Image (cartoon, grey):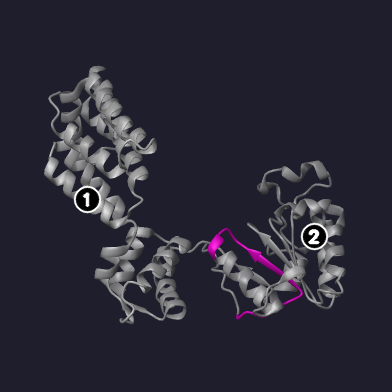
Amino acid sequence: MAVEKKVNPPFKLSPVMVIAGEDQFLRRQELQQIRTAVFGKEPSGMGFVLLEATAGITAILDECRTVGMFAPKKLVVVSPADALFRKTTDRDAADAPADDAVDADDESTDGPEQGGAGAARDMLLRYAQVPTDGATLVLMCNAWLSTTRLHKFLQPMGAIRWCEPIGVADAASWVARRSKSEYGKTIVPAAVNLLLELVGADLARLDGELSKLALYDLKSDTITLEMVSALVGFQHEQKVWALIDALTTGNAAAALTTHDELWQMDRKIGYSLVGAVFYWLAQVLRAREMLEQHVPEAEISKTLRLWQRSGPTLALARQLGIAGCRRISAALLAADMGAKSSLGEHKRNMEVFIVQLCARKG
């Protein structure tokens, strides 16, 4: 049976609101929209209260009902709120797994007789029916049951704001809308496709890349395929693999050129680059150990996920041997530690390491 897609209605502030779902970027957006609706563009000051579910439903509702003299408007946010709706009355069980939530099938299971979960929903429902003027309660939940009386009361008011992760198909239209509405740029379809290929459907990362792309050419109102190719951070990964391919075959000129390009792209690439090369050397060493155990090459490639790099990696493992792999790893460690202890610059130390590795004699 197809799962019904949950779509948010136009935003409208309600005294009790639920932000439900695991996408952190969407959750932050929804909460910011609520804060703006409550306080306007002014700082929230004393009117903003952040609580955890361990405070208990009674204390949370008491906080909502207490409006201060200097804070006529109050926003009470419970995050995470999932623990309020677990089937238990034992306060020590608040740290139980989230999948202990009540599995309600209809409103008949949503009542005080169900223990902590039903009692909390019943109290929230009664509060939502007669809320405190000037107070807004927001429940931040990873999961939210749509079969309870509380949900059925809040849903028609648009008080349930869904923040579920989206797929690549939906992410494409999201990127186009976000680029135009937030950054005033039209992004061409080919650029959207490449961006999704490089980043995936992670909205926070996509928005981060869009913010950089929007600044690439301030005179242009368009984000092009060429801009994404040149600027998106995940190009680092492709360049790193190009460097590793050159190191594997001993091509010093290509390795040094790619290394220089990486530093031009990111002046802080040093530490992450060392980590990637260490990982590759560990693969070479493991491949050598498996070769000495007479493991078939196809099994080595599958186990280490070498794929198209299988041939050159196994050839290098044979050439270096276990002692050679360890010697090269020690040289990389010396280059890294030298940079961390002010013995040379990171870029220069890596260049020396590249030359040493590519001049290997086995």
Q: Can I make out residue 346 in this image?
A: yes
Q: Which mark is residue 277?
A: none
The mark closer to the camera, 1 or 2, is: 1
Q: Earlier in the sequence, mark 1 or mark 2?
A: 2
Which residue shows up at 25% across the image and 23% down it? 327
Instruction: Please say whether residue 320 is one of the residues in the magenta stretch.
Output: no
Find out whether the residues at labels 1 and 2 contact each other: C-beta distance under 8 Å.
no
Say which of 184 and 108 sits in front.
184
Magenta-colored stretch includes residue 18: yes
Give the amino acid type for the residue marked by disc 2 in the picture: Asp
Residue at 14%, 37% (x, y): give it. 249
Q: Looking at the rendering, which quadrant does residue 134 occupy?
A: bottom right
Identity of the residue drawn at 69% across and 58% down: 79
Amino acid of disc 1: Asp
User: Spatial distance from mark 1 to mark 2, Cα to Cα?
Assistant: 63 Å
Query: Percent from the top left, x then y, of residue 158?
Result: 67, 76
Q: What span is in magenta?
A: 10-25
User: What residue is disc 2 on?
Assistant: 110
Secondary structure under badge 2? loop
Q: Is residue 229 above or below residue 43?
A: above
Q: Which residue is mark 1?
A: 260
Q: Position of residue 96 (x, y in %)?
A: 71, 43
Q: Position of residue 88 (x, y in %)?
A: 80, 47
Horizontal side, residue 129 vs residue 146: left or right? right
